[in-house]
């Protein structure tokens, strides 16, 4: 069986969420450092259009969105599960809110003028305008990612840090008890996004319990990573066959084999078109034939995605 290849870039918060889980689980894996902006010629042939970051590849199976990436990692490495059954619905609800609403708040905090003035990305004018143009194209048709004014975001951000700090001062050491769950990792990457910017670190000064928790999360590291070239990842896909899907479910009158288009419901409206292999309660999967890498199965979580005939 092929191993995990994570397509990610260093500055990406959602990539940090996955890197941190791989660190917590002590996983050895390969990783491709992708460009922060398009084009991504070594990743898009695998997804067939989806362009959010990160993407996980295992041979010719490709996983889009951290909701399914983290679940699959936990299935492969079940020891110290981050999805404890006794809190499953609540933990997934917290993770979803944190990865959607709180992330949108954090984007507004991260790109406020005070931070932009010291962010290395924004020191070079042409790099900055290329980044802005790329993200405008990425967000076309949606106000979900870049739509919150800083003045609206800031009280939401500080209020949530305060609640986290209060909870961690009486409970813990993690958000749902003695061991970290997916709720911790979703919260962690948002905190990391802001905390790692020196100009914004003062936000955390009043919150010592939150900072102690954050340092524990940082200490998990990133696992045992071997950086590979994008061309090697594509070669692995070409040399592999997707895993067969057994007992795939089809809800909502969908049928195996029909041609569908799949894309996120919030932002990043770049569709993936393929033959439907699963449309169950937890997962959507489509098969595509790519000119460069052959047959690929692309997997998405059910929550957060739309399937159109
Ligand atoms: N729901 C997605 C969100 C991923 C996301 O928004 N990633 C950001 C980077 S952290 C992104 O895709 N930005 C645009 C890009 O990298 O092209 C997930 O959980 O994977």
Image (cartoon, grey):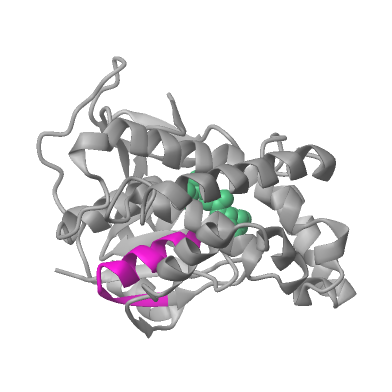
Q: Which residue appears at 21% of the width and 53% of the height?
A: 81
Identify which residue, 194 or 10, lies in the foreground. Answer: 194
Res. 180 image quadrant: bottom left
Res. 154 image quadrant: top right
Q: Is residue 238 above or below residue 306?
A: below
Identify which residue, 51 or 208, lies in the foreground. Answer: 208
Kindly give the residue lying farthest to the left in the view shown.
246
Q: Which residue appears at 82% of the width and 56% of the height?
A: 112
Q: Is residue 23 a member of the stretch shown in magenta?
A: yes
Q: Position of residue 53 (x, y in %)?
A: 52, 58
Q: Which residue appears at 20% of the width and 35% of the height?
A: 86
Q: Quadrant of the C terminus?
A: top left
Q: Quadrant of the N terminus?
A: bottom left
Q: Position of residue 35 (x, y in %)?
A: 60, 72
Q: Is residue 259 a member of the stretch shown in magenta?
A: no
> Which residues make up the magenta segment?
14-31
Identify which residue, 234 or 105, lies in the foreground. Answer: 105
């Amino acid at each position: 069986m092929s191993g995990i290849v994570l397509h990610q870039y260093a500055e990406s918060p959602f990539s940090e969420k996955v890197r941190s889980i791989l660190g917590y689980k002590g996983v050895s894996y390969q990783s491709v450092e992708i460009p922060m902006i398009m084009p991504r010629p070594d990743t898009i042939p695998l997804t067939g259009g989806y362009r959010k970051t990160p993407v996980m590849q295992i041979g010719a199976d490709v996983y889009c969105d951290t909701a399914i990436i983290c679940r699959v990692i936990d299935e492969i490495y079940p020891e110290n599960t981050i999805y404890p059954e006794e809190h499953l619905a609540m933990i997934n609800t917290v993770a979803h809110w944190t990865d959607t609403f709180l992330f949108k708040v954090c984007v507004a905090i991260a790109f406020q003028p005070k931070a932009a003035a010291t962010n290395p990305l924004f020191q070079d004018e042409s790099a900055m305008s290329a980044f802005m143009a790329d993200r405008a194209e990425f967000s076309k048709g949606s106000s979900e990612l870049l739509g919150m004014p800083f003045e609206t975001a800031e009280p939401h951000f500080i209020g949530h840090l305060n609640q986290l700090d209060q909870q961690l001062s009486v409970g813990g050491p993690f958000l749902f008890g003695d061991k970290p769950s997916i709720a911790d990792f979703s919260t962690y990457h948002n905190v990391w996004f802001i905390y790692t910017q020196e100009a914004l670190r003062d936000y955390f000064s009043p919150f010592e319990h939150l900072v102690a928790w954050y340092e524990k999360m940082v200490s998990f590291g990133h696992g045992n990573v071997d950086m590979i070239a994008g061309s090697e990842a594509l070669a692995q896909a070409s040399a592999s066959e997707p895993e067969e899907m057994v007992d795939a479910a089809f809800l909502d009158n969908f049928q195996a084999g029909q041609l569908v288009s799949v894309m996120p419901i919030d932002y990043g409206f770049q569709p993936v078109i393929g033959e439907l292999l699963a449309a169950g309660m937890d997962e959507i999967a489509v098969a595509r034939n790519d000119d460069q890498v052959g047959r690929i199965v692309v997997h998405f979580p059910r929550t957060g995605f739309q399937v159109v005939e």
